[in-house]
Image (cartoon, rainbow, N blue to C red):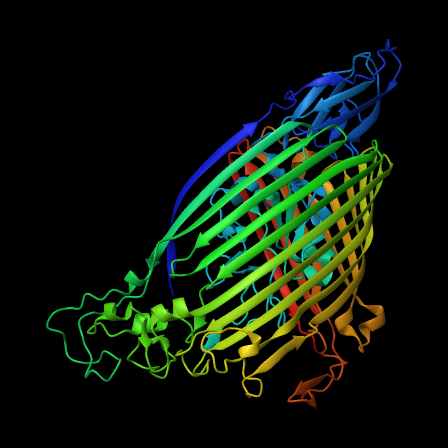
Amino acid sequence: MRTSLILLAGTMFHLAIPAFAYSADALLPSPNASIKSVAPESVQINGSIKDSKGEALIGVNVKIKNSSNGTITDFNGEFSIKASNGDILEISYVGYKPVTLTVSPGTSYNIIMKEDTETLEEVVVTALGIKRETKSLTYNVQEVKSDVITAVKDASFVNSLTGKIAGVTINQSANGIGGSTRVVMRGTKSLFGDNNALYVVDGIPLSSMRSTQPEGSFEMPDGGDSDGISSINPDDIESMSVLTGAAAAALYGVSGANGVVLITTKKGKEGKLTVNYSNNTQFTTPFVTPRFQNTYGRKNDLVYESWGNKLSTPSSYNPLDFFQTGFNEINSMNVTSGSDRNQTYFSASSTNSRGIIPNSRYNRYNFTLRNTTELIKDKLTLDMSASYILQNNHNLMVQGQAHNPLVPLYLFPPSDDFTKFKTYEHFNPERNFPTQNWTYGEQGLSMQNPYWIVNREHFENNKMRYMFTANLSWKITDWMQATGRMRVDNSQDTYERKISASSSNLFASDYGNYMKQTTQYKNFYADAILNIDKRFGNYGINANIGASVTDEVSGAKIGYEGHLAKVANLFTFENIIKNDPETRPLDSKGIHTNTQAVFATLQLAYKSAIFLDITGRNDWFSTFAFTSHKNSGFFYPSVGLSFVPTEMFDLSHTPVSFLKLRASYSEVGNAPQPYMTSLAYGISGGNIESLPFIPATFLEPERTKSFEVGMNLRLFENKLNSTCKCNRILINNLFK
């Protein structure tokens, strides 16, 4: 067990060719507006509302002062309302400073709202990528801004969230820099799944791509360790929302059963060319380590354990001298530019790391290109992005007894001289090549010279990954919009293990051992969603109806492994012993799954104070083949209610600045592991063998039922904030 002390040195450089500046509360007549003399009678007032970055604001309240006449902005931030000359328009939106204006003869307005830094966090991204006000949510959502993610960067940005999200446990892989990260929300929910959260990038679920690792204490891992989120460039992230409750994640069905992390990435901005560059450097060194004794020696020179007499002079052996100062350097650059109808964003970053274990390194290079364009002005918008990732890691930390330098390092007898083993190999004239310098043998723990392990046992993984995303949005009416999205996410991992001659015979012949395998992951996702956002006086309706399909092939492998034949340390397929029982081909078609779903959500609002949420999703999952659910699928509902008294009643004479009460009930679930419902066969030694289990055609969905109540309270003009919640989770397993 050890942790690392991190020292940070960072620089930030910003180069910008001046872009068009937006006035904080600017209210400008549209250049195309026709200026008319407004008569005392009501006329139709039209306008658009954007933030300081030029992004349309959805759901902004626009009303005439001292009147019940009001409306909200649509998906493009536009509104229309009847008003008379001299009326006062009150414009408000949670997270932004309110705007008031007097209606003048102009009938068309462009309004830019300024962010209110005290309440900006109240506007969050929820399921399906929809922005909503916090007060309208009937479930718990936590938002994380990009500055939290990039303040102290990690090769895997998820590690930067440790301790920053309530109810979320983040465990970093023991592989060290670049390893995968396990995110568990509100405890373990699945009896058979991995309990990891689902990542959703720009509204589209991200493939896990988590590699399967052997379990045990002897030799692990075998084939590297990675997942789909660890290789994302943190500088491409604009914001992040975390849906910890089942009600929040219900729309994602099986995939979101363990909670959802919603990620919104950056895109191009209107204006002249802008270039940003940043550098972030960390230095690491062992911080918390086991306590070592250097007072007692061995009983004799033939044993390894130090259970002998007290040394006359304490040993100077210090295992920490083996470690080196590690570092992690991230260089990132992005370029953005665009017009009012076409914006482009490009980013490139490099992550170069050296571990605290000698000869351990990690390198990654990310490239992203994104373009957003209005094909038909104010009607049809196309948003496309492409990403390419190259990743290499060499000798990441290995757990277990074998191939782990820490075992012989920590157990080394302090009465002996460790410096003589720093020369980890000597030329062997009988074998005509250098062999391992180690006089203690394996000691029943497969122990070897620690310096030999890090220099002559090579574990290398090269990853190539590309992603392509497209989003087509069509504004049908002012209150209805249709969206179609798709993502292709493919990767190929090439893993090599080279064990040099004179290593332990458990893992190599007298000439060495070689393994090479290629693993492929292919993921395709597509959905279509119809969005409705309509207001009727004091009432509002927000509905989303859609369908999706996910097709994934994970873990398709091809390769070979075997002991070397006659030429020491010649790591090629031709030099492998073909008829050795330890030689085995690696050929697997992987696991192919398919999920089809329909889903819907409905929110009813009254006076922006009472909100009723209803959602439902039905999944048809391929792993339920041959069961009663193969045709009907399985259904997951959720319902929630929230009440904001501060919007309904005047509490200005009390210390209460904001008060929200909420309650929700939801069901989500998991599907069984693939191929459990049909008779499967394995091939061993050229013989077909039936696997020893009965097809589980009786399986039911694993359901998680969640009840939750909560309260959000702010006092004394938001100076004192309090959030409390109580939830009960009931888990039913897969079997009747």
Q: Position of residue 428 (x, y in %)?
A: 33, 78
The quadrant where residue 60 appears: top right
Q: Quadrant of the C terminus?
A: bottom right
Q: Position of residue 266 (x, y in %)?
A: 64, 40
| Residue sitting at the far top | 37
Q: Quadrant of the N terminus?
A: bottom left
Q: Which of 670/91 is in front?
A: 670
Q: Residue at x 74, y 35 (%)?
A: 58
The quadrant where residue 418 appears: bottom left
Q: Which of 507/266 is in front?
A: 507
Q: Quick check: can you spot residue 176?
A: yes
Q: Which of 90/76 is in front?
A: 76
The quadrant where residue 466 appears: bottom right
Left/right placement of residue 37 relative to residue 9 reads: right
Q: Quick check: can you spot residue 141?
A: no
- Say if 220 sits above or below 275 in the image: below
Q: Position of residue 638 (x, y in %)?
A: 74, 57
Left/right placement of residue 555 relative to residue 534 reads: left
| Residue sitting at the far left | 312
Q: Position of residue 383 (x, y in %)?
A: 75, 41
